[in-house]
Image (spheres, rainbow, N blue to C red):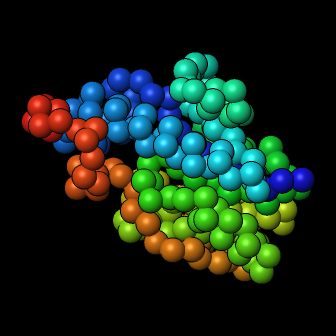
Amino acid sequence: MKNVVLVFARAPRLGAVKRRLARDLGAQAALRFHRATLFALLRRLLAERRFATVLCLTPDRSRLVLPGRLGRRLAIRPQGPGDLGARMARAFRAFPRRRVALVGSDIPALAPADLLAAFAALGRAEAAFGPAADGGYWLVAQGPRRAERPFAAVRWSSRHALADTLENFRSQRVAFLRTLRDVDTAADVPITPLLTATEQRQP
């Protein structure tokens, strides 16, 4: 059985994605960034045949029109109800006997090699994390032997997210990957033609 990569993402809807980024750059620019980053990530991951890629969307009944071959090749499943931790735990439980890595959709530097490194790390550890520069994490991976409540009592969207999660993995061997930066605010956005001068000034 192939290893599985779960991409957690919000359906691209105006006003519903990257809200902190939208406060800085405007809702249209935030939506354009979200769509471009998500679709670029999916293309990169689907090009790697050594793992299976699944897009986990919220809200559950969202319909997503994917460009080109993405729509024919990509498996999509709903995240389900609950807070982020409950949804992440449910996604892992859907693949109980496999090595599974879960990533977000807002890490421009994320590459297939990072996922292969995570799966390789699970050969010597029960879990692997990709730390984010802001104190969170851009990846969590688990093998079949998993923490009982891996995402309980986590202060999401804070500098404590990784530390809180690691408390739930104290009985397991944990490996760490390279540190990457996710995009939450305008200060995190790489130079990109997606954002026009007008959009950058939009209130």
Relative image position of residue 104 (x, y in whole percent):
52, 49
Q: What residue do we see at 65% from left, 70% from top? A: 117
Query: Which is more toward the observer, 29 or 152?
Result: 29
The reply, left or right, for residue 98 in relation to residue 161 is: right
Q: Is residue 139 above or below residue 82?
A: below
Query: Which is more toward the observer, 51 or 133?
Result: 51
In the picture, which quadrant includes the C terminus?
Answer: top left
Query: Which is more toward the observer, 165 or 132?
Result: 132
- Total residue callouts: 0
Q: Is residue 78 visible?
A: no
Relative image position of residue 79 (x, y in whole percent):
64, 35
Relative image position of residue 12 (x, y in whole percent):
45, 28
Q: Quadrant of the rendered structure where residue 42 is?
A: top right
Q: What residue do we see at 68% from left, 57% from top? A: 101
Relative image position of residue 151 (x, y in whole percent):
62, 57
Q: Is residue 149 above or below residue 91?
A: below
Q: Is residue 43 visible?
A: yes
Q: What residue do we see at 41% from left, 24% from top? A: 13
Q: What residue do we see at 27% from left, 29% from top? A: 27
